[in-house]
Amino acid sequence: MPARIAAACALAIAAAVVVLALTSVPALALVAAAAASIAPFAARARKARADRQAMRDGLPVLLDRLASGMHAGQSLHAALIDAAVAADGPLGPTLRACASDIRATSDVQGSLRQCALRLDDEVADRALLAIRAVADIPGSASPAVLRAAAAQVRSELAAQAEVQARRSWVSASAGVAVCAPWITVAALALRGESLRAYASSNGSVVILVAAMLCAAGYLCMLLIGRPLRSPQVVRR
């Protein structure tokens, strides 16, 4: 977090200096600084969404590996440890921590619950509950139960991807709607008569009010386009 705050401050100062040098309009420099300061946090949020999606994509693979291991004669305990070693991406570190807990305590149920709490995701909750059910009632049907759970998770992820694709146009439209007027303002600010109007007190008020309205409208559009999350099964 301190690094992101430092990066946001540096970007804000750089943007303000550049815009102020080009236009000599403090209000435009302030708007540019505010917009630039958001960039590190937006990048972090985008990475978090990508990591969450990568973690979810790894859940069916985990269930299939467990099913294959148990079909080959492994216990759930051993299959979990092997799957944790083979796991990669964002899911890997959490699974390896779960495997370490299992080795230390031999408490599969407790370790899986802690794993669900670390992942903090509703899709992961349902996948891990299937594994916990197999741990509670072991038997020859366990591989089939795990494969059925993997198929269900894949179906859920496909449905979520379709909904997200339909909603993504809202976010894209919001970005275009916010950027387009400010590109026009930037072009006009390079002209002498427009520059004098923007530099006046009334012009500064108009710019700042417009910036606040744009920010409010953009946030509203993002909220409209935000996909609804299912309730989590494992709660803190």
Image: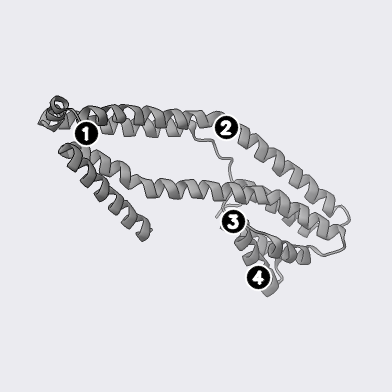
Q: Nearer the viewer, residue 198 or 70?
A: 198
Say few, some or many: other residues with alpha carbon within 10 Å of mark 4 (under 14 / 14 to 19 / 20 or more). Answer: some
User: Looking at numbered disc 4 in the image, what kind of residue is underneath it?
Assistant: Ser
Q: Earlier in the sequence, mark 4 or mark 1?
A: 4
Report x, y in % for residue 75.
82, 65
Q: Secondary structure at mark 2?
A: helix
Q: Nearer the viewer, residue 113 or 171?
A: 171
Q: Residue at x 15, y 38 (%)?
A: 24
Q: Tell me: 101 left or right of 137.
A: left
- Mark 3 and mark 4: span between their CA atoms? 17 Å
- Mark 2 and mark 1: span between their CA atoms? 34 Å
Q: Nearer the viewer, mark 2 or mark 4?
A: 2
Say few, some or many: other residues with alpha carbon within 10 Å of mark 1 (under 14 / 14 to 19 / 20 or more). Answer: some
| Residue located beneath label 4 in the image | 100
Q: Residue at x 54, y 36 (%)?
A: 228
Report x, y in % for residue 236.
55, 55
Query: Is 58 rendered above or below residue 21?
Result: below
Say few, some or many: other residues with alpha carbon within 10 Å of mark 2 (under 14 / 14 to 19 / 20 or more). Answer: few
Quarter residue 166 falls in? top right
Q: Nearer the viewer, mark 4 or mark 1?
A: 1
Query: Is 147 rendered above or below residue 156?
Result: below
Q: Tell me: 13 left or right of 63.
A: left
Q: Earlier in the sequence, mark 2 or mark 1?
A: 2
Say few, some or many: other residues with alpha carbon within 10 Å of mark 3 (under 14 / 14 to 19 / 20 or more). Answer: some
Q: Earlier in the sequence, mark 1 or mark 3?
A: 3
Report x, y in % for residue 73.
87, 63
- Mark 4 and mark 1: span between their CA atoms? 54 Å
Return the mark for residue 90: 3
| Residue located beneath label 1 in the image | 208
- Mark 2 and mark 3: span between their CA atoms? 23 Å
